[in-house]
Amino acid sequence: MAPTRINAVAFIGANNHPILIRSFVDNALKYHYIAHTSLDVIDERVSASPKDSYLGLLYSIDDVAVYAYITPLNVKVVLAIALADAVIPDIKVLMIFKTLHLAYYRAISNPFLALGNPPQPVSSPKWKNFNRQLDEIAHVVSSGA
């Protein structure tokens, strides 16, 4: 079975403003578009079954499968995974989301990281650890471990 490759991850706040959209491949604008177009599908899924955090496969576009997860504080996590010949089990995608959620939780638990108005730019040193954790998660998932 080929390893799963994460192309991008997006964290979107409860008010539908992006917190972070991180692309691990070249075409970053494509993943900004995917993150924003996912919001309508996420709203439909949440209204249909508000108790589930894992929203599953939202849609496939070009060579990417788009999955979503919503935290208890209504932060939406959108994951773009490269399509492969094999089906990715939901439990594997759910574990990736739980790991991303934990990394985000640790980042916002930092009292020196301000996500409020105005938020700190993603390029600030305060975001460095969170970005490093996202890189590690993408690397581990892509290596097939």
Image (tube, helix red, strand yellow):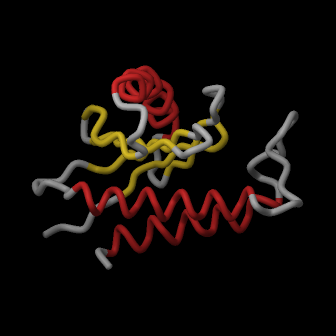
Q: Is residue 136 above or below residue 61?
A: below
Q: Residue at x 57, y 63 (%)?
A: 102
Q: Is residue 16 above or below residue 109?
A: above
Could you tell whether 20 is left or right of 114 in the image?
A: left
- Residue 89 lies, in percent from the top left, at 20, 58
Q: Is residue 91 above or below residue 53?
A: below
- Residue 42 lies, in percent from the top left, at 42, 29
Q: Residue at x 18, y 67 (%)?
A: 2
Q: Residue at x 52, y 33 (%)?
A: 32
Q: Quadrant of residue 144?
A: bottom left
Q: Quadrant of the N terminus?
A: bottom left
Could you tell whether 2 is left or right of 91 in the image?
A: left
Could you tell whether 120 is left or right of 15 in the image?
A: right
Pick the residue in front: 99 or 126. Answer: 99
Q: Quadrant of residue 142?
A: bottom left
Q: Quadrant of the C terminus?
A: bottom left
Q: Residue at x 89, y 60 (%)?
A: 112
Could you tell whether 128 is left or right of 29 in the image?
A: right
Q: Is residue 43 above or below residue 87?
A: above
- Residue 123 lies, in percent from the top left, at 77, 52
- Residue 83 lies, in percent from the top left, at 22, 48
Pick the residue in front: 95 or 82. Answer: 95
